[in-house]
Image (cartoon, rainbow, N blue to C red):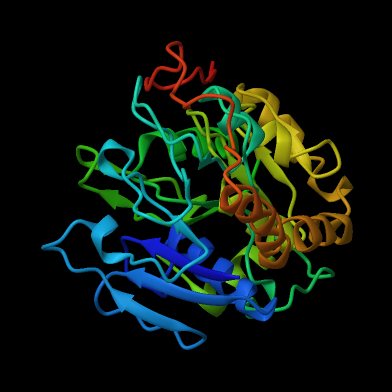
Amino acid sequence: MKILIVHKGKLPATYYGGTERVVWYLGKALVEMGHEVEYLTTSGSEIPFCKCRFIDENKPIEDQIGKAYDVVHFHHVQDNNEYGPVPALVTIHGNAAPGEQLSLNAVFVSADHARRHGAASFVYNGLGWEDYELPHLDLDRKYFHFLGKAAWRVKNLRGAIQVIHKTRNEKLYVLGGHRVNFKMGMRITLSPRVRFFGMVGGKEKSALVNGSKGLIFPVRWHEPFGLSIIESLFYGTPVFGTPYGSLPELVGNEFGFLSNDASVLAAAIYDSESYNSTVCHEYARDVYSAKQMARSYVDLYEKVIVGRPLNPSMPKLEPDQSTTLLEWISP
């Protein structure tokens, strides 16, 4: 199968770059499966495992595709849902704007993500675990961690800190933020029990996550997927978060605990050692791999090629899905 992947972003990812890493590992896995893959992406990208063309910003993307492919896989929403002359599908990585109409061949990244947009088609994200540092599951773990863009209010770093402060002496390592934050209106975290590491990646991030007792992830929005969740599980750490978006799908009872109450989560993290790190690791490794993601997309490519729509109607975000912060209880 000849596949064109279209992504409006530079590859490979640096540090977090969640969507970029998913797009990268998808193409790599498809090549390893024997498919012919090409990227149409932002200038400056370097992709060693297949051919790459750069997007001409002066021309509509749909006019730059040509007819040489069996299927085109977009990773952004095109204006007026124009996806060119070749059978195409589009992965929706975030939450759409309220009322925004999406392609009949839109693919979401969790069952909840699809449901909230009135759709049926979804594929879980996967990562190329072979590029990650091997986990050391028998380490003596000494702290909890927060992993994400700390400046983004929906990620609720403040809530994670509240959880830690409701314990007697637990510590929190923040990966993805700074102690002084000017972006959110001059916020300063003074607590000596919270340590900030900024935007870390590679071996440093792997080592920090691997040394953690658990991920504290009290998001206050409908999280479409959450790469932080599967990365943490890969290193054997359970997840303590809120029951919003995809979290109930990804974090079963074996892998963590969910509540929107800081006091309840604080009580739950005392039991972090009761979770089996090997079970958490194997779950992430096997279920959320790039290879499994690629297999699922190939099934959808085959449907699109023969003209079968991926959803019963054009998806759009349900009216009751507001963008305001979801409930967080911290008495």
Quarter holding the N terminus is bottom right
Question: Could you say which is closer to the camera, residue 260 or residue 113?
Answer: 113
Quarter holding the C terminus is top right
Q: Is residue 306 above or below residue 234?
A: above
- Is 14 positioned to the left or the right of 165 in the image? left
Question: Could you say which is closer to the camera, residue 29 or residue 288?
Answer: 29
Q: Is residue 203 above or below residue 126?
A: below
> Which quadrant of the structure image shows residue 54?
bottom left
Q: Residue at x 57, y 44 (%)?
A: 307
Extreme-top residue of the structure? 320
Question: Could you say which is closer to the camera, residue 14 or residue 301?
Answer: 301
| Percent of width and height locating residue 50 | 48, 84
- Is 177 positioned to the left or the right of 173 in the image? left
Question: Could you say which is closer to the camera, residue 140 or residue 255?
Answer: 255
> Which quadrant of the structure image shows residue 169?
top right
Q: Is residue 170 above or below residue 198?
A: above
Q: Residue at x 64, y 27 (%)?
A: 243
| Percent of width and height locating residue 51 | 42, 83
**Whether residue 171 is visible:** no
